[in-house]
Image (tube, coloured by chain):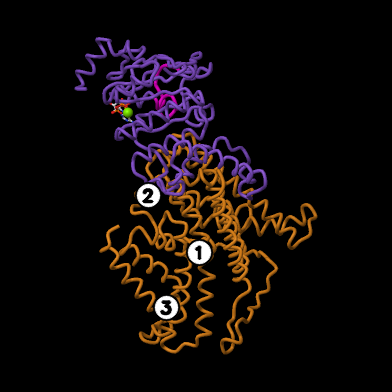
Chain colours: A orange, B purple
Amino acid sequence: MAARKNGPVIALGVVLAAGLAAPLLTGSAPGFYLEVLIGGLMAGVLYSLVALGFVLIFKASGVFNFAQGAMVLFAALALARLAEWLPGWIGIPAGFPALALAFVLATGIMIVLAWVVERVVLRPLVAQDPVALLMATLGVTFFLDGFGQTIWGSDVYKIDLGISKEPTMILQSMFEGGILVSKEDLVATVIATLLVLMLALFFQKTATGRALRAVADDHQAAQSIGIPLNRIWVIVWAVAGFVALVAGMVWGSKLGVQFSLAQLALKALPVVILGGFTSIPGAIIGGLVIGVGEKMAEVFLGPPLVKMWDLAGGGIENWFAYVLALLFLMVRPEGLFGEKHIDRV
Amino acid sequence: MRQRNIGDVILDVRNISLAFGGVKALQSISFDVREHEVRAIIGPNGAGKSSMLNCINGVYHPQEGEIVYKGEVRRDMDTHHAAESGIARTFQNLALFKGMSVLDNIMTGRNLKMKTGILAQALHFGPARAEELREREFCEHVIDFLEIQPYRKTPVGRLPYGLQKRVDLGRALAAQPQVLLLDEPMAGMNVEEKQDMCRFVLDINDEFGTTIVLIEHDMGVVMDISDRVVVLDYGKKIGDGTPDEVRNDPEVIRAYLGAGH
Ligand SMILES: Nc1ncnc2c1ncn2[C@@H]1O[C@H](COP(=O)(O)OP(=O)(O)OP(=O)(O)O)[C@@H](O)[C@H]1O
Ligand SMILES: [Mg+2]
């Protein structure tokens, strides 16, 4: 890789680092600063999860899966509604047992969905123009949004993981007033971390994981030695579906299961641009960068901007990620960890 | 002289024709391969040799003809079925997984032997784990056999070409194939590397009784190690027989002289 091309990347890195350090230098309370930082990291974990789904599918099948956000919503809806309905159907106690069973069933639904997508969308279209595949995943998006409403309903539903909404106070001895951390975010982080570890183990240490990596590395070679591509696609879409389910569960428990989840999940787009379309570590780190960047910008950059130009205020969180991604696209189109060319989309 | 124990016909190619648009890569090619033999396919560049191997393991689908493998008549193969029924291969233009380690590449060749369900694997459940360890041990033997222990953990893309060729062979071997298709395994190698590769091929044939179908340009090598030779030229078969017969066939001589060899 050419060294001179790193100039702009380093420059951008310095600006970001300066932005990260600025609040401390300009006199924000360290405790509060840390609180914002942790909050950002935890939000970032969720972006990472959705981005992970994108990257998995892109690596294995070269498809840019626009439907990843819709899959998050669909999975969350399935989980929420099944957990609500199951006690009535089979008399299972509401609460945790119903939720656990609903989780298993929702996993099954996502696997079936993967199978159907492979049969109906990927297999017939795979030799076609990548644009056709992108359009097809757009179709899947709208189908899932609409079909989701048809069978699960379109209100705001709750997923109750049984975690109190009260934030906890930590590190009181170190900082004046301590640091407020949301218990939900903490649990979300633990769940996401476990999921990532599990996936890493699956990819590195199992025959199927190896086959997935082989297909991602060179799908033609993989096919030539007898690795069945169709089966691999089902598996990878199922894994992405499972990741969507976990993201949907965690996010849904925090914000309620509603249509906006699908849009929120599109925040993963800047994340994959940042991290690189083909890099799993990139998806994770990209998610954290966007999460932190967004929160920092909202809390520390927003108010001064508003004051300076007398703006209506707020909303930085909504566009910051995209601007960051755009800057990244300009200085490093392949993303932080991605391979040089993205020629499959 | 090596001890030979040639068996019955295991692979019978009948009237295979394959065209790419106007290019007739193979025109009604027929030949057979006997169990435990080393069968060479030779011919000038573009003769259709690689295309022939590609038909045998299902990468290409011939428009005409049939392939009889272990008594089963097939119009064409698919790669998964071929691999499952004991056909493995190496590639003229390496088709390795460049970002994966040597061990992982070789393990992918072993994948079809691994039978525990994906759920058990995902949960790293007892039997799946035991299987993983067992199969990995097998692959370590393959690595020892090919003398590439020092590179076990190295990403394949970083190895020199000659070693990549060996990894390619290792991946095919890991499947414990009955029939091994080798597409120019010695191309681009120096004399010493060629000798090593020849030794491996002969050892595989001797020790495991693996049937070998080999494409090779180096006539010395072909004459030394093969039992019978098919000669292709412009998609047609122009010769078939023992190395001595083929060497003295006027038409073969003409094709080779004409192609400038
Ligand atoms: N995938 C393909 N698409 C189009 N044409 C092809 C394809 N594969 C092979 N051909 C053509 O078929 C003919 C035979 O090619 P093939 O690769 O089988 O020859 P070969 O004998 O292996 O030659 P070499 O010694 O150069 O490897 C050539 O004219 C080649 O251009
Ligand atoms: Mg060839």
Q: Earlier in the sequence, mark 1 or mark 3?
A: 3
* Quarter of the picture holding the N terminus of chain A: bottom left
Label 1 CA crowd tier, 10 Å (few <14, some 14–19, many 20+): many
Mark 2: which secondary structure?
Answer: loop
Q: Earlier in the sequence, mark 1 or mark 2?
A: 1
Is A231 rendered above or below residue B86?
below
- B204 relative position to A86: left or right: left
| Labels 1 and 3 within one chain | yes
| Labels 1 and 2 within one chain | yes
Q: What chain does badge 3 belong to?
A: A
Q: Quadrant of residue A220?
A: top left
Q: Where are the magenta residues, as a range?
A: B53-66
Residue topped by disc 3: A20
Residue B218 in the magenta stretch? The answer is no
Residue B57 in the magenta stretch? The answer is yes
Q: What chain does badge 2 belong to?
A: A
Is A243 rendered above or below residue A227?
below
Residue topped by disc 2: A345
Residue topped by disc 1: A47
Q: Position of residue A120 (x, y in %)?
A: 51, 40
Mark 1: which secondary structure?
Answer: helix
Name the foreground residue: A66 vs A237: A237
